[in-house]
Image (tube, rainbow, N blue to C red):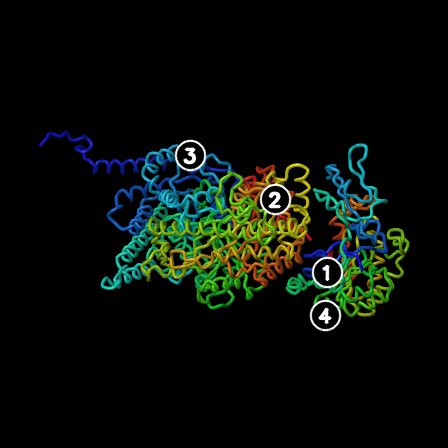
Amino acid sequence: MPLIFNIQRFSTHDGPGIRTTVFFKGCPLACAWCHNPESQAFEPELMVDEERCTGCGACISACPAGAIVRAGDGSVTTDRSRCTACGACVDACADGLREIAGDQQLPASALARRLLADRMFFERSGGGVTLSGGEVLAQDGAYLEELCRELHNEGVHVAIDTCGQAPWKRIERLLPHVDLWLYDMKALDPDIHARCTGHTNDLILSNLERLAQAGARINVRVPVVHPVNDGIEAMDALVAYVTSRLAGARLSLLPYHATGNGKYRRLGREAHSGFSAPTDEQMERLCQLFIDRGITDVEIGG
Amino acid sequence: MPDIETPAAVCDGGFAKLHNQALAAIDAALVAVRSHAAPTRVTSHATWEDDRGMNERVKRLRHQSETTQPYLDMERALIETATYLEHEGSVSTPELRGMVLRDYFAKKTITIEPGELIVGEKGRGPQAAPTFPELCCHTLDDMHNMNDREQVNFCVTADDLAAQENIVIPYWSARASREKIMRAQTPAWHDAFEAGIFTEFYEQRAGGHTCLGSERGVSAGFDEIRADIQAAIDSLDYMADENAVSKRDELSGMLIALDAVTILAERYAELAERMAAEESDAARAAELKQVAENCRTVAHGRPQTFWQWIQRYWFIHLAITSETNPWDAYTPGRLDQHLIPYYRADVEAGRLDREHALELLECLWVKFNNQPAPPKVGVTLKESGTYSDFANINTGGITPEGADGVNEVSYLILDCMDEMMFIQPNSNVQISRKTPRRFLLRACEVARAGWGQPAFYNTEEIVDELLAAGKSLSDARRGGSSGCVETGCWGYEAYPLTGYFNLPKILEITLHNGVDPRTGKRIGLATGDPRGFATYEELFEAYLAQMRYFIDIKVRGSNVNTQICARENPVPFMSLMTEDCIARGQDYNAGGARYNTTYLQGVGIGSITDALASLKCNVYDERRMTMDELMDTLDSDFAGEEGTRIRGIVSRHTPKYGNDDDYADDIMRAVFDVFRDYVTGRPNMRRGEWRVDMLPTTCHIYFGEVTGASPSGRRAGEPVSDGISPEAHADVCGPTAVIASCAKMDHASTGGTLLNQKFAPAAIEGERGLSNLADLVRTYFDMGGHHIQFNIIDRATLIDAREHPENYRDLIVRVAGFSEKWCNLGRELQDEIINRTEQGF
């Protein structure tokens, strides 16, 4: 059963209206700038806010694996190679500095029921449910089909937020139950894509084109990351691609932001450096570039 | 006969001379207190040019309003004392109270400020605050405190102090209602009051809580009303009606009180004429002439224009708030609906355009802002620590016939509140199913500026609440929310609030078997040592027993106070503005209104829910700790390692209200239902019944101060939850979950609930953000929510404002059912607002 690391209510940036977004854990890509690093692994992971740790040591005795030790300088450290993410230390920490990412699992029908809690908000605002991740399409196909079908049967607008790195068959079976595809496009250049995400983009592009041919509503979302994909050449290529292959798709430009960097530290990892956020003016210029070249359904954020 | 030497005092004019000396002393004191100019204060608008307002006139008036420091005004107290000396004993109490108003309006200082289009002040000028010694006779310590305290202070001069010491205190200290109320209460009441179980609204102020709304109140000329009252007197049946004489006294008091407002209007007419004659600027002279004509017209007849309607309302407002010190001032109620016929007729006739109408509204807004709530001290200051006097204007909603009430003036009012950005009037909107989305979005846009106005009220829920309380459909549709969120049928109902009720504190008393651990005194029932309770149900039953015990004490106490207020402080002017006081010949405070409700305001429902949920979950269901361990921890305020460990568990690993989690929300409902059912329907000594409200004003700070550590992880002394909002940091699932939890309360069975939400500006930016905010409001109202309001400001700004208040002199935030300047809030309240959960996305 898929692991869930967050269910975000009043989510207002993943599709239209007031939405609830489900974040599934695990992703086939490993984007260097990922701002949800806890979404990448398919297993539960411990996150520790060591900066605020008072060193009380309550977690040391709570850990059944003996993975938490006091270092020579008195600080408390966690040996991640021994951590099983059992969660015993989470309860022990009086300051709430420890959590397990991906500690929820719910059968599809139970999850659907929970997501209906905000149905009145969805209906008022034209919102709904967005399934995200990690990579939602990396999860069990039958589970996803049941979840989407149940929501759809209840009249809930369903959006899938995906990187597209998934077998077409899994996408195909969801088609009847999904109203909107939020489809990430990180780079058109296969080499850049491979370098930054760990995979080339051929499957991603073919899936996207097949979705378009199938008449699905698509919102292409481009994370704008300096200096990876914000150059004029890359954008020109994108314009050409969208114009020729994806007529009618909406384009969203999502400026990179570094707010995920703290999460890397809490996972005991190093954030990649070398990326920076485009300025507001730069985003406006890019947006205008698309409009000038005939792609008018374009927005910043969303 | 033996030769007895007559004392000199008796020979030398006797009582007559003493009497004249007393009146002369008052006259001298009046001269002295009037000799002081209004004090000033600094705002972040250095000059009038950079102040807010649509044009120079409004900017100047706003600047004067904001840069005048509120100050004590002794005129009213002194003139009232003279009235009592001259007339008490020779007339009935309602007549005497009418004379107090008449003499005050005949003798008070009046001025017209440069540029004013609407005239009249409650005191000597803008920001002057009269006192009401018949209700609460301030001690000299009180007066020093008002002057010296850091927040919500009032300048007091040496002459004010002398007048208070030599005239007001000697005459009023034993007469003040406050003393009579305190003397009338039982030891059990005093124990509970001192422990902070509840507060008492009649302690320093009088009942009030109504708005303009009756047909007569909205549009009749004062001479017409005079004729109505005279007709009621003429038709009294002295052959059959055993109350005919008391009715005559009351009606006669109304005639005198009505004369008061005519006298004031005529005085202003004369002043404006005089000033017009001396004015060199022709345009201003013409304005003053028009002001004179407006005053002259409404002194007797119906208002003929938009401008005259506003002027007429303002005189009514002054009369009601000068007659007594009513909680929550007074308001024009449905201002947009009252004004629209005049607006359309004036525009049609070419007398008025949109700009000028907006200017008049902005001038009215300045007038509201010129009237700080009368100075409070002690517990009353703690429960309502603000300059705002809660004049709450509801815009939008529906008409008495049930049609959409939004009109051209509704949009003008939104523009006015947006531009003026005042803490008062408390300007808000009612949203009904019929409200156009354009209006809702414009209201959200104004609210997004972040300072808390407008708040949003749900028309359909208000109508349901009023119907549930037995009002007719058309009367219910005339209703709205006044004060903070309190529901009433405007112009037809007296619905005073009686005090706040500390729901979390009662659990502390229960856990200590009836003893208040702060004092060691037994103030509640002996319901047993909680360590001996085998089940959560036993504990809950003990809590309910204590709650019922304290509700009985509170209701009894307020019923006594209601009768004392009716006897001592009839309000003939408020009565003639409220149906059916004239027809019944009965006072507003004594059951004369068509509907009479008494409200008790529950505070801390979020805190009590989380405390009980923690006990149920951690002690009984999950058995993570024993009652003994938890009690020890609470008594030590979570001290030591064990305290830290337990606080960690109860703070984070326990279901809490505000997350749409039925484990906690069911407890909320159970507590609320018992509280409501035990209060609702009790007789209130004014032909009506008790009902409940769920709002705090600033009382959640005070109630937190007196309440020890909570099983929810709340530390001793920290604020309890406000309104029906979750406890600080308890809600972690976003605003939709908060709303879903809150909607599980049956709002229609209350007289109003208050929900605060705080947003980071980024959460609702852009058009989509605005739309989402509107839909959030709509959905809450679909679910039956009564009210929601927003602070939209980021945490970093508030923290900076706490450290550097001098840079934020004009920062306004939403507190409870009102907005207040950041600088006027105490540190505890600032912290509480900073700590409210910031809803992101």
Instruction: Depth check: give the residue in front, B111 or B542.
Output: B542
Which chain letter goes with mark 1? A
Identify the element where label 4 is drawn. helix
Provide the residue designation for mark 1: A15
Instruction: Depth check: give the residue in front, B41 or A101.
Output: A101
Image depth: mark 1 or mark 2 in front: 2
Provide the residue designation for mark 3: B141
The quadrant where residue A261 appears: top right
Cα distance between the residues tagged 2 and 4: 43 Å
Which amino acid, mark 1? Gly
Provide the residue designation for mark 4: A153
Image depth: mark 1 or mark 4 in front: 4
Q: Are marks 4 and 3 on the same chain?
A: no
Cα distance between the residues tagged 1 and 4: 19 Å
Measured along the vertical axis of the image, is residue A104 above or below residue B401? above
Contact check, label 1 and label 4, Cβ < 8 Å: no
B713 with respect to B457 (left or right): right
Q: Residue at x 70, y 69 (%)?
A: A154
Measured along the vertical axis of the image, is residue B345 above or below residue B375? below
Q: Residue at x 67, y 61 (%)?
A: A117
